[in-house]
Image: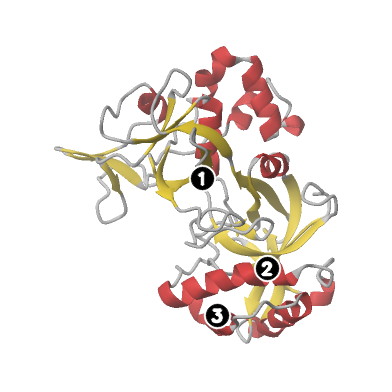
Amino acid sequence: MSAALIPAGFADLAGWAEDAHAAAFAAFRRSAIYGLENGYKTGALGIGPEHLAPAWQEAASIEADLSDAEARSFFERHFAPRLIRPNNTATGFVTGFYEPEVEASPARSEHFTVPLLSAPDDLVKVDDSNRPEGMDPYLAFGRRTPDGIVEYFDRAAIEQGALGDKARAIAWVADPVDAFFIHVQGAARLKMPDGSVRRITYAAKSGQRFTGPGRVLIKLGEIAEADVTMQSIRAWFADHPDRINEILWRNRSYIFFREADVSDPLLGPVAAAKVPLTAGRSLAVDRRIHTFGTPFFIDAPTLLAFDEQPFRRLMIAQDTGSAIVGPARGDLFAGSGDAAGEIAGVVRHPADFYILVPRPYGSAA
């Protein structure tokens, strides 16, 4: 990791005193409880569960809701802020993600023709213990065959029927673009014909590298880089239905899903950190660098989409993503449904990342 951690005081964090710290504490407490019971893998930065444990233990022991002032005092007592400067000078960057809400059917019909698939039975995780010689080291999944593990089918092959009956369709949606964005977000709430709501979340992937349609459309000269949002990409697909496969199949990555409970409709899906996401408080980070359950203060003064105010909030690292690479790169969870999608779709902003380093570890950092 090439980045400097510059000591700062909480008084240096614009908007810190005005933030709703109680909301961040509630999200932090969920990760604290899971982290104490199950642990999280330590990222390359070196801040691990053993450093976070004192704050986790106190948070887990608190049963009553805290006021903003009490939550602010908790974070100030347990942590010290450090400004992350990638390559010593560059600022960070944030995007947004959300949980789509889409009409779906449990069975294929004339209207619902696009499947959302469970993990196929020949999919196998790949690591250094079983990776065949010569296989791309990026690939974390492969296909089990009688002759050994090989690279898994890509999006184009899967959508043209390469899996046969190896994967079960959890549900069917009507629009291939809706299905693709469910893949991008890694979760969805499905509104079924009987009025019920089912939730699906990430289970596995084919393993190939992700190539976003926005980047493809920029390279083709179809959309200017400054104009790329989820909304502009959807509008382009609506105007060019005959080119949907041409563009989407350039993204070789394919996502498989599993069913999940909608235990609390006010919370988002259970993500990589194994706790429900909190709108406006959960942050996806590069898990190779950072440890889940770590607090970050994000200062993105040009980002106004969340509440028409400069985005300056305490966030908790609770998810990750293949496009989230680097020490000051994050994805902000905007919530569930269309309104959240409108917010998430326009978030592409520079931001300062302040990682909250546990004391006394942070005092010597």
Disc 1 crowd, CA 10 A, few/some/many (<14, 14-19, 20+): many
Marks 1/3: CA distance? 27 Å
Does 282 appear above or below 95? Answer: below
What is the three-letter code of the residue carrying label 1?
Ala
Q: Which mark is residue 187?
A: 1
* Residue highlighted by disc 2: 24
Q: Nearer the viewer, residue 57 or 262?
A: 262
Specify whether 147 is left or right of 63: left
* Residue 89 visible somewhere in the drawing: no
Q: Position of residue 131 (x, y in %)?
A: 27, 49
Quarter of the image for the C terminus: give it.
Answer: bottom right
What is the three-letter code of the residue carrying label 2?
Ala
* Residue highlighted by disc 3: 60
Specify whether 157 is left or right of 53: left
Q: Position of residue 158 (x, y in %)?
A: 36, 28
Sequence-wise, the earlier of marks 2 and 3 is 2
Quarter of the image for the N terminus: give it.
Answer: bottom right
Sequence-wise, the earlier of marks 1 and 2 is 2
* Residue 101 visible somewhere in the drawing: yes
Q: Secondary structure at mark 2?
A: helix
Do callouts 1 and 3 mark residues in contact (Cβ within 8 Å)?
A: no
